Amino acid sequence: MPEMLESVTAQAGKPLAGLRVVDFSDTLPGVQATQFFADNGAEVIHVERPGGCSLRRHPAFPALGRGKKSIQLDLKAREDTKIALEVACSADVVIEAWRPGVADRLGLGYDALSATNHGLVYTSISGWGDQGPYVNVKGYEALVAARFGAFDSVQRLTTRPGPSFISTNIASYGAMQSALLGTLAALLERETSGCGQRVATDLVKGMASLDVWNWALRLIGERYPDAFTNTSTYSARLVPQSPTFFKLLSCLSRDGRWQQFAQVQPRLFRAFMRAVELDWMFDDPNWSTVPDFEDEAKRVEFWEMLLAKTRLKSLADWQAIYDADNNVFGEVYRRGAELLDHPQLIHNGQVAVIHDPVHGPVRQPAPLVRLLDNPIQLDAPAPALDAHGAALRAEPGRPSPPMRRAGDAPHGKLPLEGVTVLEMAFFFAAPYAATLLTDLGARVLKIEPLEGDPIRTQLGFPEVSGMHVFQGKESIALDIKTPAGQEIVRRLAARADIYLTSFRPGAMDRLGIGPTALRAVNPNLVVMNAMGYGIDGPYADKPAFAPSISAGSGISLRNLGPGLQSSPDMSIELEKTESVRLNSAAPGLANPDGFSSTAAASAMLLGLLARARTGKSPRMLTSMMGTSAHVLADQMLDYRAMTALPGPDEELHGLSARYRLYETAEGWVFLAAPDEAQWETLARALAPAPIASDPRFVDAGRRAANDAELAVELARAFRERTAREWEAALLAVDVGCVALPGRETEYVYQGSLGRESGCLAEAYHPMIGDYERSAPSISFSRSRTQALGGCMVGAHTRDVLRELGYDDRAIDEMERQGAVGLG
């Protein structure tokens, strides 16, 4: 690495200090990605169009723009384009989010910039990627989510038939994290190759990276229909058909507050049943299979008993139970920015206050990754438009980073080749983070108990629930309570680059294989704590599962919209209906497991890059709850006179008349034409409907004032043709409109559209043979990626122990003593 960057980094104390990042993006994925760079010390220059980035008018801009520099340039003007080119040629990283081909037409594409800036990492974030039938369609968040089945997957969010709109920006967040993962990997690879490259991702693949649970369910159900049948979550009478529903119960307290319990593991569910005084059921022959009942009437009876029991206690009563027993826990459903008051976030230092010259003190999420040894303190507000324009225009020609030419750099290698991750984590969020690194070439050694990570047996078909979590990994089965198992962990840590853990605080320390002990063996070990809540503090010992984090963070109520009923005297029947809606508000693609996995993966690469640039190996923390604050970045602020974020209608069609779902003569479409510049084109395309000449809609002001009436008229017009016909007609004139597939997301991604869009890759699993998995969400111009299959528990124990110097006789003896499992 150039000496100049090392010295600047050492002085600044932030891992990315000394890097220059130029942001040409105008939408959430790019702007939020560069927020991550600014938070960690990079100089971020936001090139804004005349009048400013569209997000300047968004209430979240004080956080999204924090710590950046602003220059206003008209990229249609030759002189301004020349300035943009000069600034970009001095950058380490360029991020753009134009449609494919736009950057090249502007003279700001990768080929033009890398010709003189050999060290440039150039990251493109498009809506639909560079292949498939929708490449040139506008990349609105909801268009991607709608076309790939996200809205069809949540039909229980409302009581009306048809798809429901999801407000959480799932595709944008997935693309943002994919962009971070690719950019950080390319920067890390640059440390050894001395050369940059182009990174590409998109909203389609970013959204796919968030969920693989339902993907596996659908795959197995279709491959083995006689052994495993995919059933609906609810019966025709909306009765839950899975025992997991009761373990993750949504219910009212006596004082009318909704809570989401987190009791998935058997010991947790037993503790919960004691708390509601129903633990006698375990010994009653009529109820002993609780909470799993074949008979629907019995499930209804049990459900109603649970709701009646939980409503006997107030929220304060429940809190007292939580304080007394860490195995019983539920999160209250929060809304808006209430998460900023969460005691654990405050304890973790994951809430920041920045004084903004316009808005005064602004409470907002602290950096996504907390550096435990040297926490980053945010103090720079979002800049005024063009606040740094004069200085940047007058800047003497800053040389590009001194790197090698692309022709001299290695091609076809994995960007994380040589990186080893030691994983000691269960279930989904942390383990899947390591899986994402295997796609980029990291070697992941997963330590499992002899019986395997519990996720392997979460579903009836063996290995399905953990199939994707184990992709690309090597499984070493150990009893870490034995001296031999502990010694093996220490030997593996001595060779590792990253130690990834999600265990409750203190569990590994008591065995002598916690972070402190392992760093004594290997001082260069980057420590990644990927936790539900934190490593200490008021909630650190509490169970954390995706639905309860979704409830406590505000994701669930964000998706559910304004229609939730809440009353202490609500009937049991209505409570059941609302409970179903609440349980549907954290679907596979929009739940904190996937969100947290991608965040922890990016955090691990940040740690490696920090080590490479500073020589110091950080200890880091991400939490599911803290990550959720960044997922909800567009509403997770609190300042005086903050304007409310527009929300969906009660029936969850969308955000406005021109950004919402419409039923057609056959099927549903999503219309995304919110910009006034698109109005005339849309109105003409709707002919013969007389909308354009309607006095209620003749100008922007009246269209805004009469938005509800406009939605009624548009709904009438859309019923005149089928969804496919509307998609063809409106896309032909570049108006955003797509037909919904009428199937859940996993069916779309695993079907022809997913294949055409580059979302599928072939892999092998020893249990089921060849199968199609989700492809890596990132591509590189020089480096390659890989898509490997899963593994069985202990499949690599013997080979890895041989690497450590154990001979077969010693290995067999350790197996006989129960210290290791050999698969």
Image (cartoon, rainbow, N blue to C red):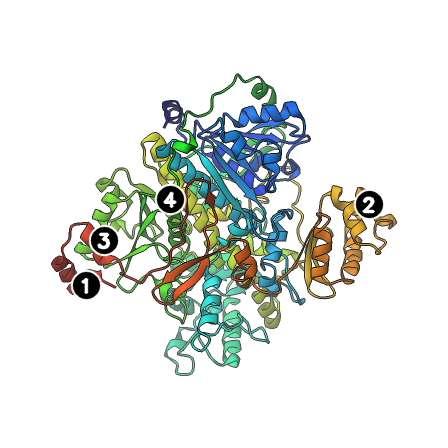
Give the mark nearest the N terminus, 1 or 3. 3
Is 699 displayed left or right of 4 in the figure? right
Is 533 displayed left or right of 741 in the figure? left
Q: Residues within 10 Å of mark 2 (few under 14, many from 20)?
A: few
Identify the secondary structure beneath mark 1. Answer: loop
Most foreground residue, 503 or 327? 503
Under mark 2, the amino acid is Arg
Q: Residues within 10 Å of mark 4 (few under 14, many from 20)?
A: many
Question: How far apart are labels 3 and 4 at the CA level?
Answer: 21 Å
Question: How far apart are labels 1 and 2 at the CA level?
Answer: 75 Å
Q: Residues within 10 Å of mark 1 (few under 14, many from 20)?
A: some
Q: Nearer the viewer, mark 4 or mark 1?
A: 4
Is 257 displayed left or right of 782 in the figure? right
At 34% from the left and 37% from the top, the residue drawn is 618
User: Which residue is labeled 3 in the image?
Assistant: 800
Give the mark nearest the N terminus, 4 or 1. 4
User: Which residue is labeled 4 in the image?
Assistant: 414
